[in-house]
Image (cartoon, rainbow, N blue to C red):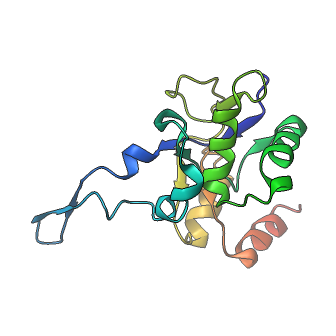
Amino acid sequence: MQVDLLLPRYTREDFDLRPVRLMSSRRRVHRANETQGLYYHWLSHERLLRGVPARSRMRSLVSIGRYSRRFFDMLLRRYWSTGVAMYEEILLPVACATAGAAQCRMGSWSPGYGLPSVPLATPFRFRPEYDCEEFADALSRDTRKLFHPVKSHACLVEYLDRRGM
């Protein structure tokens, strides 16, 4: 599979701005209104996203991805050289989606987006920090879980030292 932009999964802006049901610990249901949104960066990029079709307004986790030289050349030409700066979790997928397939091909690590997919880690888990034992156990059992981010450098070093790596 040849793609220019390969990211874990994509979330469209209209999904983020939908009303959300939130559960409290007492099991009462609260509704968030549409202006609150789940991803606050959409509002700070409103002016730059004017004219971008709704189907192309998407975001993704970008700290783990694969990017082609062609993709970065396109970013430089269309955005960076003209002084356009956006939050990368929005810019990278939007830039590829609006460039068209002839200039940028998108792929996903998760199936179901109508894009070529490469399942690398199932499930992909994100938390602000993972317990060292949970991370080391999953790593030693080769569970194919991808932990992002692993904050404890000492945990990873200890794990690698125990295995003589």
Residue 140 occupies which quadrant of the picture?
bottom right
- Give whichever of 17, 30 is nearer the camera: 17
Where is 126 relative to 4, above or below? below
Total numbered labels placed on residues in the image = 0
Name the residue at 55% across, 36% down. Answer: 56
x 54%, y 71%: residue = 128
**Which residue is at 66% across, 29% downward?**
118
Q: Taking 61 as reference, is 33 left or right? A: left
Q: Which residue occupies 51% across, 57% down?
A: 46
**114 to 19, vertically: above or below:** above
Residue 127 percent coordinates (x, y): 51, 65
Q: Is residue 3 above or below residue 87?
A: above
40 or 157, which lies in front? Answer: 40
- The residue lying toward the viewer, choosing from 7 and 125, is 7
Quadrant showing the N terminus: top right
Considering depth in this image, is 26 or 92 the residue closer to the camera? 92
Taking the image as shown, residue 68 lies to the left or right of residue 104, namely: right
Could you tell me residue 115's position as x and y percent? 60, 24
